[in-house]
Image (tube, helix red, strand yellow):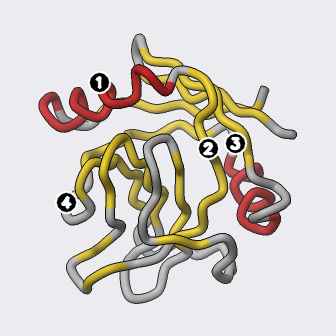
């Protein structure tokens, strides 16, 4: 099972890629690593943070998709009626855009550090964009 480390400032999380449930999404995501970007707070979805990718497309179809990620679940929305993005739920989340409810591929779940995820999400909410780095372990 492939693990990744997600780091932002003093926050560090370990997560597992769901390679059996979302093999194509995991393969595409691994090609993006190491990923360095910024997490911003969602606008429509509730308690979540995201990385927007605009018109980027990876040629992915839906697999293991959901509109209701649980705390610590990361989705990759392959694009369509809204821009491609990666979203991480830190609390109650219903994945949406200005066009309405969306469904993204659940490909990663945080397994260590989950107790600090809510605080990280609130930091993004109240202090703005936070640098993020994701690397394979």
Mark 3 or 4, nearer chain start: 3
Where 55 sits versus 16, above or below? below
Where 98 sits versus 4, above or below? below
Task: Please name the residue shown 26% across and 37% down the image.
Answer: 129
Mark 4 or 2, nearer chain start: 4
Element at badge 2? Answer: strand
- For label 2, the residue is 109
Task: Please name the residue shown 60% across and 61% down the image.
Answer: 106
Element at badge 4? Answer: loop
Could you give the CA–CA distance between mark 1 and mark 2, rounded to whole angstroms? 17 Å
Mark 2 nearby-residue class (10 Å; few <14, some 14–19, many ≥20):
many
Could you give the CA–CA distance between mark 2 and mark 3, rounded to whole angstroms? 16 Å
Mark 1 or 3, nearer chain start: 3
Where 36 sits versus 66, above or below? above
Residue 73 is situated, as x and y percent measured from the top left of the image, at 53, 48
- For label 3, the residue is 33
Mark 1 nearby-residue class (10 Å; few <14, some 14–19, many ≥20):
few
Q: Which-is-in-front pick, marks 1 and 3?
A: 1
Mark 4 nearby-residue class (10 Å; few <14, some 14–19, many ≥20):
some
- For label 1, the residue is 119
């Amino acid at each position: 099972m492939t693990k990744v480390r997600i780091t932002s400032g003093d926050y560090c999380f370990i997560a597992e890629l769901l390679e059996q449930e979302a093999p194509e999404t995991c393969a595409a995501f691994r090609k993006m690593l190491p990923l360095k970007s910024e997490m911003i707070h969602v606008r429509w979805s509730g308690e979540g943070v995201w990385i927007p990718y605009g018109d980027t497309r990876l040629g992915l179809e839906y697999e293991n998709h959901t509109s209701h990620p649980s705390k610590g679940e990361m989705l990759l929305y392959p694009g369509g009626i809204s821009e491609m993005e990666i979203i991480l739920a830190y609390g109650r989340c219903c994945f949406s855009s200005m066009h309405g409810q969306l469904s993204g591929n659940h490909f990663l779940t945080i397994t260590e550090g989950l107790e600090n995820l809510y605080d990280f999400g609130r930091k993004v909410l109240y202090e703005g964009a936070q640098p993020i780095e994701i690397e394979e372990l």
